[in-house]
Image (cartoon, rainbow, N blue to C red):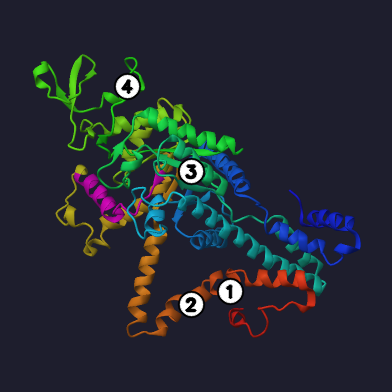
Amino acid sequence: MTTYREHISTAADSVAQQGETWGAISPENIARMRLQNRFKTGLDIARYTAKIMREDMAAYDKDTANYTQSLGCWHGFIGQQKMISIKKHFGTTKRRYLYLSGWMVAAMRSDFGPLPDQSMHEKTSVPALIEELYTFLKQADARELNHLFKELDAAREAGDNVKEQSVLNQIDEFETHVVPIVADIDAGFGNEEATYLLAKKMIEAGACCIQIENQVSDAKQCGHQDGKVTVPHEDFLAKINAVRYAFMELGVEDGVIVARTDSLGAGLTQKIPVSRETGDLADQYNSFIDGEEITDISQLKSGDMVIRQGETLLKPTRLPNGLVRFKPGTGEDRVVLDCITSLQQGADLLWIETEKPHVAQIAGMVNRIREVVPNAKLVYNNSPSFNWTLNFRQQVFDAWTEEGRDMSGYERDLLMSAQYDNSELSLIADEKIRVFQKEAAEQAGIFHHLITLPTYHTAALSTDNLAKEYFGEQGMLAYVQEVQRREIREGLACVKHQDMSGSNIGDDHKEYFSGAQALKAGGKDNTMNQFS
């Protein structure tokens, strides 16, 4: 690692070579600007963060306590604030990532306005958001280092050598806010070539990890809605290959691919693949097709198709739109086959979209996968689409019922009611929610836990509370008491919003460029001084 003093020395050599014409250029200022912009391109970020993910995956394989976490975001400022808060409260961003949610892009970032999560939004909005997130994370680096440079100047001016060395150590050991982003490419927004082209743009913007799902691109649905249609394995594997080629072409050899299966909740397929020999992937996929056994050609009408399942001839069940139905109850078997196939042919991590957060259900599938691929690991969506309170209260209710406990004081279908909030059942359910990520990491192979839409919901809740009070009796006190005063008391950096937007960095640059004649914004009349 190059130290601050070494950066100055390198810059000084470059300036000295130019002679007196560069006399106004300060090597130390060059060193500061270089440190504040250590990532020159998105590919620099992708390579750096891919290495982090690979190291974290290896650490998890050794100890499941090393699982990772992230929160979804739809704006660069939101991502920046998460990392600033994590560093503030925990001192490090280690094992904390960001998640770029396709739902959030569709609902919050499309030029069409809010859209459903059906890949209807502009595909270019995905790499644009990745670039925006990293722009804000890099700005957080620049701002924090700028404060350290101010402290260094103050220590030198005071002649405090101990403080000076302490700040120099903080500069040399500075931990960046730039972390891996798990980026949702939906079903690839088209065929395998379209997937490759979009993956390249995402990687060039900084993505080291791309999550792709096995739904049909032009029939894509949100993972927690009905009507999902999956593709045969060879179609999905072609897109996994496309993403890998994109990583390799751009020199991000550690790039991570998350293969997501929606088969647990998907009851339809768009096409029946061609089987070349008994037991191949197409044959296995077709074994799940539902239909009517054919014993006589008179059972067929014009346009009907027939496939062979073992010794049985089957007329697949087709809907009026031509989609083909899978046999009921085959979802878990299809998930296991999807996951094994993806890991054996290029994917690094799995994503199993489930209908509820249930450790035993997830572990049951993962244990079957691990019989074939022992180090299989999952990324899991701790989704706001789940009613966590109701789900876990019902899990406790069911467990107690099996134990033979008297449950007459509870109504299973009404367990969401506030009347149960302080009951023994609800307290135990809350504890199970609290340790869900830890237990799922231990028992169900979950390497990475994420919440897809947290800031969508927190923004809605906080805005509702502010609107209710501000436009009501509390007036300005609603903002001061519940927002600004809490920002000050809890040490939130954004209370100084001018500093967050780069005002102080701009002042320093003006001084670098113009010297004493620089017109700076941060003087005595700047109201931001009220928050010192």
What is the chief secondary structure element of the magenta stretch?
A: helix
Q: Residue furthest front?
A: 302
**Which is more N-terminal, label 4 or label 3?**
3
Q: Earlier in the sequence, mark 1 or mark 3?
A: 3
Instruction: Determine whether 307 is above or below 183 in the image.
Output: above
Crowd around label 3: few <14 · some 14–19 · many ≥20 (10 Å): many
As helix, strand or loop, the secondary structure at mark 3 comes to helix
Residues at circles 3 and 4 in contact by the CB criterion of under 8 Å: no
Tell me what residue is drawn at x 85 percent, y 63 percent: 22
Which residue is labeled 1 in the image?
A: 498
Instruction: Name the amino acid, label 4.
Output: Val
Image coordinates for residue 429, horizontal then vertical, percent: 30, 53
Q: Does 159 sit above or below residue 290?
A: below
Q: Nearest the camera: 69 or 222?
A: 222
Kindly identify which residue carries mark 3.
198
Q: Earlier in the sequence, mark 2 or mark 4?
A: 4
Magenta segment includes 394? yes
- For marks 1 and 3, give the CA distance: 35 Å
Q: Is residue 125 magenta?
A: no
User: In the rendered view, does 299 fall on the left or right side of 247?
Assistant: left
List the residue tagged with mark 2.
484
Alpha carbons under labels 1 and 4: distance apart: 61 Å
* Residue on which disc 4 sits: 274
Amino acid bearing label 2: Gln
Visible residue check, residue 72: yes
The Cα–Cα distance between marks 3 and 4, rounded to whole angstroms, is 28 Å
The disc, 1 or 2, on the residue closer to the chain's N-terminal end is: 2
Residue 190 image offset from top left, x and y in percent:
40, 40
Q: Give, as a single range, the part of the protein colored magenta.
A: 380-401
Label 2, label 4: how far apart the Cα atoms are: 63 Å
